[in-house]
Image: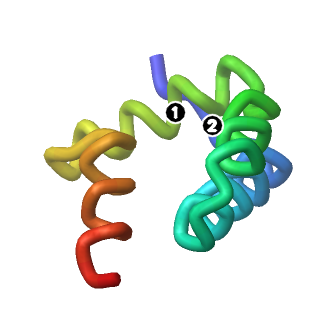
Amino acid sequence: MSHRISLMAAGELRDALTAHRRGDAAAAAAALMAIDAESWQAIQQRMSALGGDLPALLAHLGSDD
């Protein structure tokens, strides 16, 4: 079953990645926790299809500081 990422969830993910990039772990966690379950499953499926996951993406974002 293919899940869809809601527009709200896409914004929350963007906010989480931006907060992580700023070093604001609390804001990043809050944004990630605001993502609905169906969107979260879709995000995981898409990341997996690309051969990655959220921890790998966060590590990559933090690697060029």
Q: Which mark is residue 21?
A: none
Q: Nearer the viewer, residue 62 or 34?
A: 62
Q: Are marks 2 and 1 in contact (CB under 8 Å)?
A: yes
Residue 56 location, x and y as percent?
Answer: 25, 48
Asked if residue 5 is positioned above or below residue 13 in the image, the reply reads above
Asked if residue 58 is positioned above or below residue 29 in the image, the reply reads below
User: Dot 2: few (<14), some (14–19), or many (≥20) neighbours within 10 Å?
Assistant: some
Image quarter in which the C terminus is found: bottom left
The residue pinned by badge 1 equals 42
Q: Would residue 26 appear left or right of 45 to someone viewing this image? A: right
Residue 52 location, x and y as percent?
Answer: 21, 45
> What amino acid is found at the position of numbered circle 2 in the picture?
Arg
The residue pinned by badge 2 equals 4
**Tag 1 or tag 2, which sits nearer the N-term?**
2
- Please give the name of the residue rendered at 54% of the width and 70% of the height, measured from the top-left corner: 21
Asked if residue 9 is positioned above or below residue 57 in the image, the reply reads above
* Picture quadrant of residue 49: top left
* Label 1 residue SS: helix
Q: Would residue 6 appear left or right of 5 to someone viewing this image? A: right
User: Dot 1: few (<14), some (14–19), or many (≥20) neighbours within 10 Å?
Assistant: some
Q: Residue furthest bottom?
A: 65
- Please give the name of the residue rendered at 65% of the width and 32% of the height, measured from the top-left corner: 39
> What amino acid is found at the position of numbered circle 1 in the picture?
Ala
Residue 45 location, x and y as percent?
Answer: 37, 32
The colour scheme is rainbow
* Label 2 residue SS: loop
Asked if residue 1 is positioned above or below residue 60 in the image, the reply reads above
Q: Nearer the viewer, residue 38 or 31?
A: 31
Residue 61 location, x and y as percent?
Answer: 36, 69
- Please give the name of the residue rendered at 74% of the width and 33% of the height, measured from the top-left corner: 35
